[in-house]
Image (tube, grey):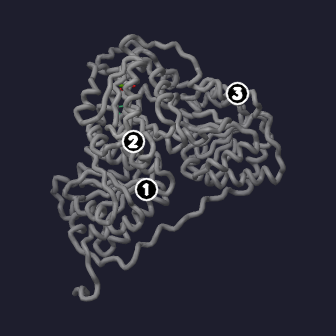
Amino acid sequence: MKWSVTVAEIPVAQAVGDTLAALGVRHFFGLIGSGNFAVSNALVAAGATFYAARHEGGAITMADAYARVSGPGTIGVCSVHQGPGLTNTITGLTEAAKSRTPLLVLAADTAASALRSNFRIDQDGLIAAIGAIPERLHSPASAVADTVRAYRRAVTERRPVVLMLPLDVQAEKCPAPEGPPPAPPSLLPVRPAAEAVSAATDALARAERPLLIAGRGAVLADARAPLETLAEARGALLATSAVANGLFAGNRWSLGISGGFASPIAAELIAAADVVLGVGAALNMWTTRHGHLLHPDATIIQVDHEADAIGAHHRVDLAILGDAAATAQALIEELARRETAPSGWRTPELAARIQADSWRQTPFEDAGTADRIDPRALSRALDTLLPHERTVATDSGHFMGYPAMYLRVPDAQGFAFTQAFQAVGLGLATAIGAAIARPDRLTVAALGDGGALMALPELETVARLGLRMLIVVYNDAAYGAEVHHFGPHGGSLDLVRFPDTDFAALGRAVGLTAATIRTPADLRAVERWLAAPGTPAMLLDAKVVPTIVAAWLEEAFRGH
Ligand SMILES: Cc1ncc(C[n+]2csc(CCOP(=O)(O)OP(=O)(O)O)c2C)c(N)n1
Ligand SMILES: [Mg+2]
């Protein structure tokens, strides 16, 4: 029996779309098939903007980067067809799971009874296997509650959640929700235990050369201000993991990135620290150069809001379980209570050395020729040419250190680094999601030729969406990382070298502005482009010297 006389009914897909819009979803990414057509249209009808990718592998990473660059409080949303639509997201979804990005994937699913559907796979099992959370619309009656629960888990657990939308449930109607859905509870950050704060303050108070290394946990906790105050109170220097690059931009005591990308002066000072406070940073092999960057006698304090992260990669002498910002605040208060004076490390001479010896000032022998540009010279010239208000998104590969080292960013949201899964090919989609999150900034997509070719369909997306973007392809016509990995051992490199690709022609074919860069003088094309706002995004096919081997990569291969 039906109560339809008094209870209005709406399609389940509409209930899902209305609920998500009411929860605050304003932008979403995806690729439309029959299974997600209705729900995506419902979300658009409810006020959200949809961005169509040309491959789900792009759509998922766009949503991931959109969430990262928008900052705490915003989740990424991606809508896909069942079966292959979902399997196409798996690499980018794994990246998001490893990076703990709050993300909601709306994935159609076959009806429970459609045992022989071509599209049928165990979607729940697949999603669980990569560390994301499978959720499900269980019935028309629970559709709104199921949607709210999936959204809430993505926000509070900071993980990608895949909400399965079975076609048979979608085909039904459900009662129209009465009033807006309940907002997820706002959870206050976890304060650390007093004993842990006291022990850490003891160590910090004794330090002569204290150093603070902040990671993504610090970015997510919005901890810049309390961390800078804490560092000032103790006269500490500041550094970040690669993914948190930019967090302390503009602070004269910031050394930039700790790890393989660290400048010589940064590496020297990081190694000199006698107390290292890692905050929301895994202190993994990349940040510590396989543990060799930090002094063997340094006292290591690690702050994380998850017990599992503490000591996972590096020796830890003192652990503090707590939110990055709340812990910084507690340490500030305890230092003040004890009236601890700053260490003597911050001298004007040291500040001058830090400013004078960054990567941009460190000399190198320019290996450029008449038809090949040195990737360092290219990166340094771009840093000078491009507006400071920028977002730098990088792909994976040998080239990736150059943009991280030479291209300054205005803040942590200005650096989009989807590298937790070390997958090649996510860079362009990362840049697209970033550009949509921050249209006020110029987005720089730094790609290798291998990664650019993996992401090729999304060049069309950049042009179609009219994004303000400079795509820089560091083109060595090779999987350079593999060339430099195996070349020194005398292995055949035939499988990892390719004929040169004309990326400028590929860019023009989809409507982008494009230029081939062989010498620094060719970068005048970028100046002309910058001077003509409103022209389509630009692609640079930079023919780079293929023989230079980045020190960070050599070190990673050696394991020290
Ligand atoms: C999806 C994926 N496939 C393969 C690899 C192995 N891999 C690491 S770097 C690299 C080469 C990337 O080439 P390119 O984008 O041109 O950058 P380059 O190293 O030449 O600077 C490959 C194939 C990977 N990390 N991820
Ligand atoms: Mg290459």
Mark 3 vs mark 1: give the one in front. 3
Q: Position of residue 274 (x, y in %)?
A: 73, 34
Q: Position of residue 500 (x, y in %)?
A: 28, 20
Q: Nearer the viewer, residue 558 or 93?
A: 93
Label 2 belongs to which residue?
430
Q: Residue furthest front?
A: 531
Quadrant for residue 61, please give it.
Answer: top left
Q: Position of residue 30 (x, y in %)?
A: 29, 51
**Earlier residue among tags 2 and 1:** 1
Quadrant for residue 153, please give it.
Answer: bottom left
| Residue positioned 42% across, 20% down in the render | 485
Q: Amino acid at mark 1?
A: Ile
Calculate the distance from the C-alpha at mark 3 to the C-alpha at mark 1: 41 Å
Residue neighbourhood size for the residue with mark 3, other residues' Cα within 10 Å, grouped as few (<14), some (14–19), many (≥20): few
Residue neighbourhood size for the residue with mark 2, other residues' Cα within 10 Å, grouped as few (<14), some (14–19), many (≥20): many
Q: Which mark is residue 352?
A: 3
As displayed, is residue 145 above or below residue 268? Answer: below
Q: Nearer the viewer, residue 188 or 392?
A: 392
Element type where label 3 sits in the image: helix
